[in-house]
Image: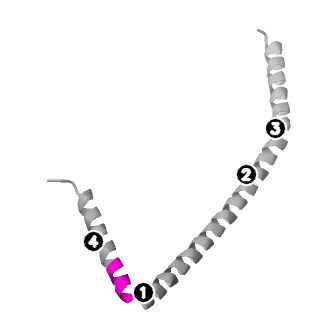
Amino acid sequence: MNSANVNTLRDSASDALDQVQRAAGPAIKEGKRQAGALLDQSGELIDTVSTRASEIAVDLGKGMIAFTKKNPVTALLLAVGAGALMISAAKSMQPRR
């Protein structure tokens, strides 16, 4: 292959690369735009879920306090039972010697 053919081949390859880059440019820009939009949406969704979870936790806490004030003996028995279950579960998860 002589130098003229090599130069022609290099120029053709360079032209082809330029065409591919020009053709891909709009698709890449659109992909970036869509990725940004999805990122924004996911951030909003996380904020919404976080806010809702906080509201549910506050409501649950208020409900537990109200129940305890109305039924202190029942609440105490439930707490003792739950504690016993947790101790039993913790012991069952420990390896046997």
What is the spatial separation of the Cα atoms under label 4 and label 2, in whole angstroms?
50 Å
Q: Who is closer to the viewer here, 41 or 82? A: 82
Q: Residue at x 85, y 37 (%)?
A: 22
Distance (Cα) linking label 3 and label 4:
64 Å
Q: Counting residues from the N terminus, which is met first, the one under dot 2 or under dot 3?
A: 3
Mark 4 or 2, which is nearer the eye?
4
Specify whether 59 is left or right of 48.
left
**Residue 91 in magenta stretch:** no
Which of 75 and 92 lies nearest the eye of the viewer?
75
Q: Is residue 4 above or below residue 78?
A: above
Q: Residue furthest top?
A: 1
Q: Say which element carries label 3.
A: helix
4 and 2 marks in contact (CB < 8 Å): no
Q: Which residue is mark 3?
A: 24
Residue flagged by tag 2: what amino acid is it?
Ala
Residue position marked by numbered label 1 in the rendering: 68
- Callout 2–callout 3 Cβ contact below 8 Å: no
The numbered mark, 3 or 4, whose residue comes first in the sequence reads 3
Q: SS at mark 4?
A: helix
Secondary structure at numbered mark 1: helix
First along the sequence among labels 1 and 3: 3
Tell me the distance, in whole angstroms, between the alpha carbons under discs 1 and 4.
19 Å
The magenta stretch spans which residues?
72-78
